[in-house]
Amino acid sequence: MNAVCLPARVITPSTCGAAAWMLAFVLVALAGTSAAIANWSTCGKPCETPSSAVYVQLTPGDNPIRLVALPPTSDDKYSMLFNALTNADPTLAVLFADFIWAGAFAPYLLDLNLALTQDELNVVAPQLLQFTTINGARIADPYYVNAGFLYYRKDLLAKYGFTGPPSTWDELEHQAAVIMANETTTNPNFWGYSWQGSAYEGLTCNALELFASHGAGTIVDADGHVSFNNAAGLKALTRMQRWIGWISSPACAGYIETDSEADFLAGNSVFHRNWPATLGTLQGTPLQHLVGIALLPNDGPGTRSHGTLGGWMVGINKAVAMRGMAVDILLALVSPKTQVANFRNLGRLPTRSDMYFGSGLCQPFNLSHAQICDVTPLPDDYIVNRFSAQTTSNYVKASSFVYKAVNDVLVGRMSPQDALNQAECLMVALLHGRDALPGHCLFEVRVANWATSLVTAITSASIVIVVLCIAAVTAQSAHPVMKAASPSFCVAILTGGAILLSSNYAAAVYPPSWPGSCWVSAWLFAVGFALMMGALIFKHWRVYRIFRSTSSIGGTGFRVVKLTNVMLARYLSIMLAAVAAAMGVWMALQGSTPVSARVFVPSPCAATDQDLRQFSFVCAYNAPGLWLLGVGSLALVATATVLAIRSRHIAMLMYNESAHMAVCTYNIMLVTTLTIPVMALTSGNATTLLVIRAVATVIVVLGSVVSLFAQKFWIIAFYSPEDVDRLAKQRARRDTFNTNMAKVQPLPPL
């Protein structure tokens, strides 16, 4: 073929013949230096290596152009190019990219609307612009297009009595099995069907063709719906699984295009799925006149054949230093002569509107020579697009979900249904968020039965203890010990504790079974805690006021502070009214939002995909309302703690009530301080949360019972009221003596 030079504005002599450089990429890629491309105007055989195997690097100097080799697989190419673009390397000039990378590469590629003339922009087939235009920016020019087709051995079909290639997958399986059964007698390496089953982008293309041709959808439909997990999709994937080891070699599960093509060209299969480039590869081989090309099969009546649209585009790095030369190279690559040469020699389908898909370029029909025109014009619905438009920059990740799941089926790691479920769940979560996941994608984490039983048991036992204490306090209210402790305060504290404990029952209820349990638990907790802490605070305050004068030597005696049961009831009623008002505000803030909700559970060490899709039904309270209750409860604890510290050493006859009250308050403060952060750290585990909450309330209530009443009940059990009065009088005389002695001035030292 004749060389075509770049436009005159590129004056570097070594760039002449750039229109033919695609035909010399094997030599260039192997050499890896600009010296190896001194003459691009000729190309020796073979010229099969696709241009996407390199990118163009431009550096100042006599030989500015250098071709840098890329990895063989599409996914590795993507990674290398994406890293180079994000690093803004000014020497990275022109690169080839799969259509599906457009969304990810767009921010780093030059908008060709700003670099090309309108005539240069208008030559592209309009149907391809959707792949190279992102948010109005023309980030690349289409370089060539592909579609999946079926290659077949015409000689073998005729040999075994088949009149033509299969039109359905069932026919393909039948023909492949019949021919394979006979051919393996002389060629043990012979298989019926070779295709691409490795875990890479090519497998997504194969899977898309199978899904679409079975009527299962196009993986992600135009409206964004993830569509393949259905009966037709299961049939398609089960078919692919069945092929491995039957009509397809087990090695097929690791094949990429070059592997499967080599298998076919070696005469080791009768059918082969690949791109039109295989037409170019066939030239000059022993199979050149023995191979035909056809549409891929379908699943029979009601289904249609489909081939995945593939294609590569050529773009310019936005950060390139030598932009003018980069533009000229791009124009040479998409020129008519380059596209014709690529079509003739490499089987690449042109992207220009005047020769799209090889229009007008095919040779006269020849039974002995396969060409793309044997299957064109294609049915209008044959081409099926990959889902890059629906997924944009998420395409590479979304595609990996598909090909990894399918490959897991092919190698026996996963069943077809499990693979469909997994891929669907991952894709829906990626594209639409976890809230859009269908039910089978979710794994509910419910409170363990043992935890519910444990909470019920310890709560019930604790309530029994509290009720017995209330009965004992009431029965012994006339005893000097209990009378000095103010039975009304004690009963109020214990009653609040019982209500607080009962909130554990509501907390242990499965919210969907009784949505009201969330508010019942909140109300019982708020009322019980407020009643318990309110009575304790008023008790601290009363003790502090009555005995304040005794806290320092030289006081004026007891201070009379009258606090009757009626006054206590009034104060507690005011506090409970404030709590009720706060709860009302909280419920108003919650509004119509359901208080019971499905919440995804974060996993601190997610080792499986299931960990990422776990959820629990929890009481999803309004945050401001929850803060209101939390701050109010902490304010009660803080107030009680301050009063406890200030009154902890007040002498109260033989049983030192203020010290026990202080211990009670310290216990509540300590448990509250420790429980809140622990519950925050374990918020992802419903079982742990319930157990911690229940244990904390039990410790708070029973700790209060022990600190406030253990000594009192011990004294009541072993001392009569008369003994208590006698011991109290002795203690009073001793305290008076100690106080008077403290007033005596010590003698001066000798």
Image (spheres, grey):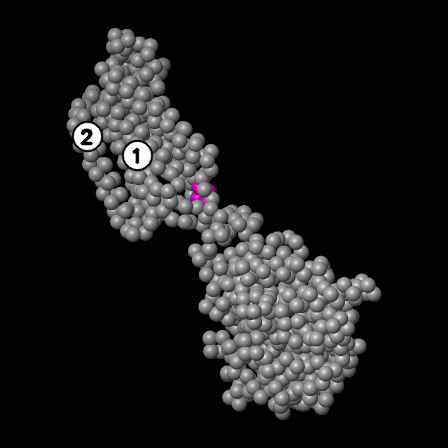
Near-viewer residue (64 or 407): 407
Quarter assignment of residue 150: bottom right
Answer few, some or many: residues within 10 Å of disc 1's Cα (few below 14, many 20 plus, some between 14 and 19): many
**Up-down relation of residue 561 to residue 366 (above or below):** above
**Up-down relation of residue 353 to residue 432 (above or below):** below
**Residue in the image at 73% along x and 87% along y:** 41
Quarter assignment of residue 77: bottom right
Quarter the C terminus occupies: top left
**Residue in the image at 30% along x and 47% along y:** 625
Answer few, some or many: residues within 10 Å of disc 2's Cα (few below 14, many 20 plus, some between 14 and 19): some
- Image coordinates for residue 292, horizontal then vertical, percent: 70, 77
Callout 2: SS = helix
- Image coordinates for residue 536, horizontal then vertical, percent: 28, 29
Q: Is residue 117 visible?
A: no
**Residue in the image at 54% along x and 69% along y:** 302
Q: Amino acid at mark 2?
A: Ala
Callout 1: SS = helix
**Up-down relation of residue 496 to residue 236 (above or below):** above
* Mark carried by residue 529: 1
Q: Amino acid at mark 1?
A: Phe
Near-viewer residue (324 or 441): 441
**Up-down relation of residue 684 to residue 141 (above or below):** above
- Image coordinates for residue 631, horizontal then vertical, percent: 31, 42
Q: Is residue 618 visible?
A: yes
Q: Which residue is mark 2?
A: 569
Relative to 699, is 386 on the left or the right? right
Magenta stretch, residue numbers = 681-686
**Residue in the image at 73% along x and 65% along y:** 178
